[in-house]
Image (cartoon, rainbow, N blue to C red):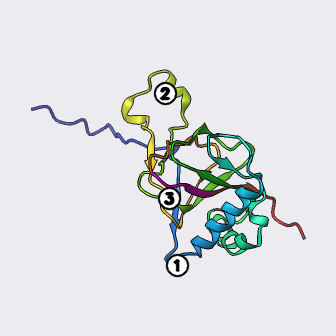
Amino acid sequence: MKKPNPGVKRRTMGFFSTPIWRVEWSDNLQLPDLESTVLRMMKDAPNGVVVSNCGGWQSPPGVFDQPEFKALHARIQKEVTRINPRLKMTRGWANVNPPGTRNIVHIHPACALSGVFYIAANEKSGDIVFNDPRDVAIAVGGLPNFVSRPVPLKPKPGMLLLFPSWLPHEVVENQSDTQRISLAFNARLYAPDLD
């Protein structure tokens, strides 16, 4: 029997992990009122904007300027600040995805952190799927045990997800018979006040 070489030290070091923060509040945050506000916004501006959405409706930025979203904005900002006190929410928009719609793979450029808060969703209304951001490793056929498969997360009303803005993600097709309604947003790093 061969004896191990006592002069050799081995260890595996895991670098470059990517955090995704998930927050669920126990109160309902008046989700029906938030849903009504989003649907009113959609009625007032039916064309919306097209960014990563394939079908469905996306509001122009500025959703958190609506008075109905002020309390939720404050709660989300508190969670964002837990990650880094210099992070401040900037743009926010509403998404309404009826059955058959989805969002293609995308990132949020020029931001540090992004997030999504679900107002209305169910098991079949379309998972958000996060992709391994290491394109080079994937392109050269990286070692399979070191390159991750896409990670799907099921949406749930009242759930907040926060993630690095550079993390590629998509939302698969809504296969339910109801709309998925969410708010998405970005945050940027700001320099500390210099007094």
For label 1, the residue is 27
| Closer to us: 185 or 120 | 120
Q: Relative to 187, is 6 on the left or the right?
A: left
The tag earlier along the polypeptide, 1 or 3, is: 1
Identify the residue at image location x=54%, y=55%: 180
Residue 35 picture location, percent across and down: 61, 66
For label 3, the residue is 121
Q: Relative to 104, is 4 on the left or the right?
A: left
Give the secondary structure at mark 2: helix
Q: Quadrant of residue 123?
A: bottom left
Q: Relative to 107, is 16 on the left or the right?
A: left
Which label lies toward us, 2 or 1? 1
Task: Determine the residue located farthest toward the bottom in the rendered image.
Answer: 27
| Three-letter code, disc 1 | Asp
For label 2, the residue is 138
The tag earlier along the polypeptide, 2 or 1, is: 1
Which label lies toward us, 2 or 3? 3
| Three-letter code, disc 2 | Ile
Residue 166 picture location, percent across and down: 63, 43
The magenta stretch spans which residues? 177-182
Residue 171 picture location, percent across and down: 53, 44
| Three-letter code, disc 3 | Ala
Give the secondary structure at mark 3: loop
In the displayed structure, would residue 39 be above or below residue 173? below
Q: Quadrant of residue 169?
A: top right
Q: Residues within 10 Å of mark 3 (few under 14, many from 20)?
A: many
Q: Residues within 10 Å of mark 1 (few under 14, many from 20)?
A: few
